[in-house]
Image (tube, rainbow, N blue to C red):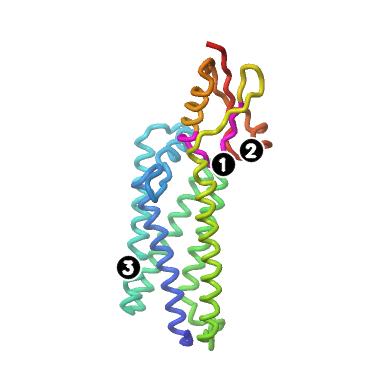
Amino acid sequence: MITNKKETGNLIRYFILIFWALFWLFNVIDKFIGGAHYLFVGKDRFAQIQRYFDSIGLGNPMVTNFTLMFTAALEAFALVCFLGALYHLIRKNIESNRAWSFLGIVSTLFIYIFFSIGDQIFGDHSELLEHALFWFIALLSWIIINRNNRFHIFDNFSIGKKSILLFTVFALIIGSITCFSIFRHNQIAFKDRTQAVQAKRISENKYKIEFPFLAGSSAFERTIEKFKEQHTDLRINYIYTAPKPMRLGQSDGLIIYLQTEEK
């Protein structure tokens, strides 16, 4: 049961600081881990930044390396600040917690100002929208950290045992149904990502292959291998795909065509 206003305010501070600490932790990890790995898919930041600078005539990789190192240093500093704020909140050092929180928020605001300037220079408006949104979230976080004890929405707030029990039962039911649906989908459809696809003949020497959504390179390789096993009298001359406007009207997955001839 939650009834203490001060405890509620500290709980909100915990949520905010844990969010930003995890946020910057994974951003820092993302700089070290590029590409797809087991349980983690990192974005190739070097390729992204290199493409940006190359578009304005600064294709030297050293420029990209310096930018990534500077960005990683800023993000690591923000991470340390939020970890420090979280540590002092646990130790109930309110003034130290406020000082470290302030440093973390200011560094976060500076980082997103830096990112937004880059977005304007390189003309990436989708990234600009994302970074501007995080800038305002960081500012809102600072306001909540400092003023949440003055919010009256949590006055006399309590949760009874009966309500907690009903919520738990309801959450377990919904969670069970969701888990069953996910495992059922994995059992039926997820294996399509790697299985071979049957080619359809659309003319004398042309075949069409429609891959399911999220099919990977294994499905492509097995499909070509299966086609060769089924058509030992044919040789594949060309493998090509249709233009994007034509593709979108038919499927969300990849569609390829095989141009063949008799051996």
Task: Give the crowd class for mark 1: few <14, some 14-19, many >=20 residues within 10 Å.
Answer: some
Task: Look at mark 1 in the image and give the residue it sits on.
Answer: 213
Q: CA separation, marks 2 and 1?
A: 8 Å
Identify the element where label 2 is drawn.
Answer: loop
Q: Are marks 2 and 3 in contact (CB under 8 Å)?
A: no
Tell me which residue sits at (57%, 31%) in the image.
198
Residue 85, horizontal then vertical, whole percent: 35, 70
Residue 153, horizontal then vertical, whole percent: 56, 81
Q: How many marks?
A: 3
Identify the element where label 3 is drawn.
Answer: helix
Task: Look at mark 2 in the image and give the residue it sits on.
Answer: 251
Q: Find the magenta span and give its range.
A: 208-219
- In the drawing, what numbered circle is on residue 84? 3
- Residue mark closest to the camera, 3 vs 1: 1
Q: Are marks 2 and 1 in contact (CB under 8 Å)?
A: yes
Task: Give the crowd class for mark 3: few <14, some 14-19, many >=20 residues within 10 Å.
Answer: many
- Residue mark closest to the camera, 2 vs 3: 2
Residue 72, horizontal then vertical, whole percent: 36, 50
Question: Eyeballing the image, is 232 above or below 101?
Answer: above
N-term-proximal mark, 3 vs 1: 3
